[in-house]
Image (cartoon, rainbow, N blue to C red):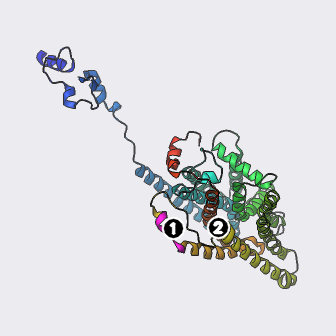
Amino acid sequence: MFESQTAIASSHSPHLRKPGSKSVSSDLGAGEPGNSVQEGYVFPLTVGEMKASNSPMHTTSIMPSPIFLWRFKVIWFLIWAFTCCKIGWDSVMRMSADLRDLFLYEAFLYYNPLLLVTMMVWLWGVCLWVFSQSTINYAKIFDLDSNHLTHREIWKSSIWMTVIVPTSMTAYLYLYSHGEVALAASQPVILYVAVALVLIFPFDIFYFSSRYFLLRTLWRIALPLQPISFPDFFLADILTSMAKVFSDLERSVCRMVHRQVATIAWFEADSVCGSHSVAIPLVLVIPYIWRLLQCLRQYKDTKEKPTLSNALKYSTAVPVIFLSALKYHVSPDRWTYVYRRLWLFSSVVNSLYSFYWDITRDWDLSVFTRIFKFNKPSLCTNLFYGRRWVYFWVIGSNLILRCTWTYKLSAHLRHNYLTVFMVTALEMLRRFQWIFFRVENEWNKITKSGFQIPMVDMPREEEKLLGSTNHNV
C-alpha cells in the first residue's frame, strides 16, 4: 500500500518522479487542457488540481441551443395566444346578443389603434432587415448614428407590444363580461398611460436615444419651422397612412376624459365623443395638413416647383374628409344629390393624383429601375432583384389600395369596425411596400450626387447588435 501511494505521488510531482517515468500530463498530451507548457517542458497538474478540474462544479456550463430556446418561446407564445383567444371568446359569448356588437365595437375602438401601431412596428423591423441585407445604407439616408436600433431590437419591442396590448384587451373583455365594470374601464386607461410614460420617460432606459429621435422628429413635423429633412417628411408620409389611428385615439382619450369607458353614454352618436363628433374629421386631416405645410416649407427653402405640386396632392385629401363628414350635418336629400357627388369626385381625384405621384415621383418607376441589390445571394435576391413582375405588382396593388383608402377617410362609411380595421391594415401594407421603393429612390439620388460608401467596410447588423452596450431594456 505504501508503495502504491509513493507511485501515485511520484507520478504527480517532478521531484518524486523517477527518471524516464511517464506523467499524467504525457497521457493527456502536451498543449491540451490540463497541462502547462513552458520551454518544451510539461508541468502536470497536482492531485488537488486534478480533482478540482474533474469536479462537476468546474465543468463547462451547458447552455441550451438557440433553436431550443426559439421553440420554447414559440410554444409559450402559442399557449398565451390560445389562452387570450379562449378567454376573450367566452367573455364575448357571455354578453347578450343585442349588446354584443356594441361591446366589440367599443373594445376595438380602444385597442385597435395600438394593435395597428404594433403592426407598423413589426413591418418597420422587416424593412430594416431587408435594408441590412442590401447595398443601401439606410443609416446615411435617415442620418442615424452608430447606436441606432437594429431590426432585432425593433422586433424585440414589437414582441412586447404584441403581448401587452392583447393581454390588456383580454382583461377588459373578461372583467366587463363578469360585471367588474370599474376594473374593466381601468384597463385601457392604464395601457394608454403606460405607453405615454414609456415614450416620454426622461431617463436613459428603454432606448432613450431612439425615443428622443422619434419625439424630436414628431415635433419637427408638427411645427415645420426649420428646413425639412428626409426623416421629417418620410415619417409624416407614414402618419398619413395612420390617420385612422389618430382619429380613434382622439375618440378613446375623449371617452376616458369624460369617463365614458364601459358605459352606455358612448352609444349616442351625437354625444361629445360620439361617431358624429366634429373632432373626427379635424383629427383625420391633421397628418395631411402637416405634410402640406412641409411642402410649402420646402418650396420656401428650395424654390422647386414640384414641391407645390406635392402640396396640391395632400390638399386633395381635405375635401374627401370634410365632405364625408357633412352627411351628419345636412339633410338627406342635400347629401344625396349635392355633397355625395362632390365627395365621389374628390375621392377619385385624390386617389388618382396620389397614385400618379407614388409612381413617378416617390418611386421613380417611369423607366422600371431595378430593385436594390443585396450583399449576397439570398431569398430576397432570387425573388425581387431584377424581376419586372415586382413592379407590376406594386403598381397594381398601389392603385387598388389607394382607392380603398378613401373608405377609411370617409366618416360616413365607418360603421363596420371590422371592415375599417382591415382597410387600415391594408393601407399599412401598402405603405410598407411603398417604403422599399421610396428608400431605394432616395439612395439612388444620393449615389448619383457623388456620395459613395464602400459596402464591404460597413458593419453588419449582428456585429453592431453584439457590440452595442448603449441600449438597455
Say which residue label 2 marks. 363
Q: Is residue 332 above or below residue 227?
A: below
The residue tagged 1 is 384
Whether 227 is drawn above or below 49: the answer is: below
Name the quadrant containing residue 116.
bottom right
Secondary structure category for the residue under label 2: loop
| Up-down relation of residue 419 to residue 223 (above or below) | below
The quarter of the picture where residue 60 lies is: top left
Looking at the figure, which quarter contains the C terminus?
Answer: top right
Question: 378 or 95, which lies in front?
Answer: 378
Q: Is residue 335 left or right of residue 210?
A: right
Give the residue displayed 50% in from the left and 50% down from the top: 456
Please, what is the three-letter code of the amino acid marked with disc 2? Trp
Looking at the rendering, the stretch of residues picked out in magenta corresponds to 380-388
Quadrant, the N terminus: top left
Q: Position of residue 239 (x, y in %)?
A: 71, 61
Q: Nearer the viewer, residue 103 or 443?
A: 443
Label 1: state its secondary structure: helix
